[in-house]
Amino acid sequence: SGPARVDPDSLPHRSPLPRRIHSTASSMSDAGGFSLLKDDDNVEVGLTPNQQMRINNGTTHQPRSNVLGASPLEMQAHAALDSCNGLPWKHLTLLYILAGSAFITALVAVNKTPEGELSMSGSDLYTKSICPFGDLTWGDEVFQFDDHHYQIIGSKDASVSWREAAMDANSRCYGGQPGYLANIDSEDENDYLYAKLSKKPHFSANTHDAWIGATDMKNEGVFSWIGPKHLINGVKFWEGDENGQAIDGRYTNWGQDSSGQSQPDSNGEEDCIEMRGASPGRWNDKNCYQPNEFFIVEFGTPATSTDH
């Protein structure tokens, strides 16, 4: 004899599954599946808000920043987290990689900074930024007068406008100081520079002249020295034509042009100053775009920047 058979009809009748966990075909999702956690009205049951959000992946939910009873700081933190919820994991991974790379790059840059530079003063750092490659004199002789250094640049075959001369001078460095067209503030300085100019190989006093760092381009008839920290608003030293006057008693050495006209002659097209060879060391205003064979470069703080 085997085990006793049980008649199904003799078993107690079972009621249907509760409505809240009953699964029907009507609960099919847009993705083609169905949820055992939805009731007949397609409403999630028995889930926390976070679980609902993760299952539905984008279904409207209450943002963390709207949590009742949260402090302002907590609400800001929740808002930041909410803003990240919509980002795909690949984007977040990329953000982490970029942030890590930036941090590593910064550490490498700090480690590669020479130890001496970390202890530099403000003036030393300024010098380093102005002359990052050290002395750049391009092979021309550097000479000294009264704690200043100079170069005479050019040759008999050169043809240089005032602007070109100024740009060349600014590209030079010596002793941690940038170059500029010479600012002349005394008779001794002027005589010394002319003496050096006249000894330059192939210089001919009868035919050659040299650019210096004065101009009235900004304000016609008001001549200024252009140099470090005074590239736009120069130090004024003369106002007017040949009958004008020195400003604050500053040194001037006006001469005559090739036609014998006293200088400056208030010609609106002649805005830049040259040191003439024919009238030893005298100054003449000339068209900035006309060429000269030579120009004079100065290094260091110009004497013209000091108050008289």
Image (cartoon, rainbow, N blue to C red):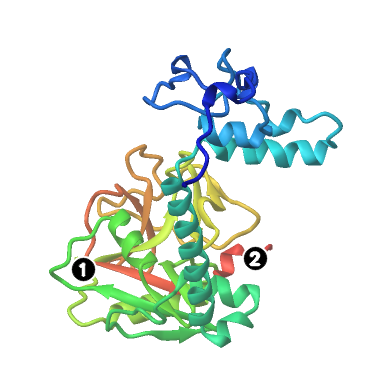
Residue at (68%, 62%) from the top-left corner?
Answer: 307
Corner quadrant of residue 180: bottom left
Q: Residues within 10 Å of mark 2 (few under 14, many from 20)?
A: few
Q: Are marks 2 and 1 in contact (CB under 8 Å)?
A: no
Kindly state the secondary structure of the residue where label 1 is placed: loop
Say above or below: 120 vs 40. below
Q: Earlier in the sequence, mark 2 or mark 1?
A: 1
Q: Is residue 255 visible?
A: yes
Dividing the picture into quadrants, the one containing residue 79 is: top right
Q: Which mark is residue 306?
A: 2
User: Relative to residue 98, is residue 184 depicted above or below?
Assistant: below
Q: Position of residue 261 (x, y in %)?
A: 33, 48
**Is 38 or 131 nearer to us in this picture?**
38
Relative to the observer, which residue lies in front, 139 or 188? 139
Amino acid type at circle 2 is Thr
Q: Secondary structure at mark 2?
A: loop
User: On the rendered image, what quadrant is the C terminus found in?
Assistant: bottom right
Instruction: Judge whether residue 300 can be spotted in this image.
Output: no
Q: Crowdedness of circle 1 by 10 Å Cα count: few (<14), some, many (20+)?
A: few
Residue at 37 percent of width and 75 percent of height: 194
> Of residues 248 and 162, which is closer to you in this image?
162
| Amino acid under disc 1 | Asn
Q: CA distance from mark 2 to mark 1?
A: 34 Å
Vertical placement of 238 versus 113: above or below? above
Q: Which residue is mark 1?
A: 206
Residue at image coords 62%, 74%? 123
Q: Position of residue 64 (x, y in %)?
A: 70, 34
Residue 265, percent from left and from top: 39, 43
Specify whether 189 is left or right of 161. Answer: right
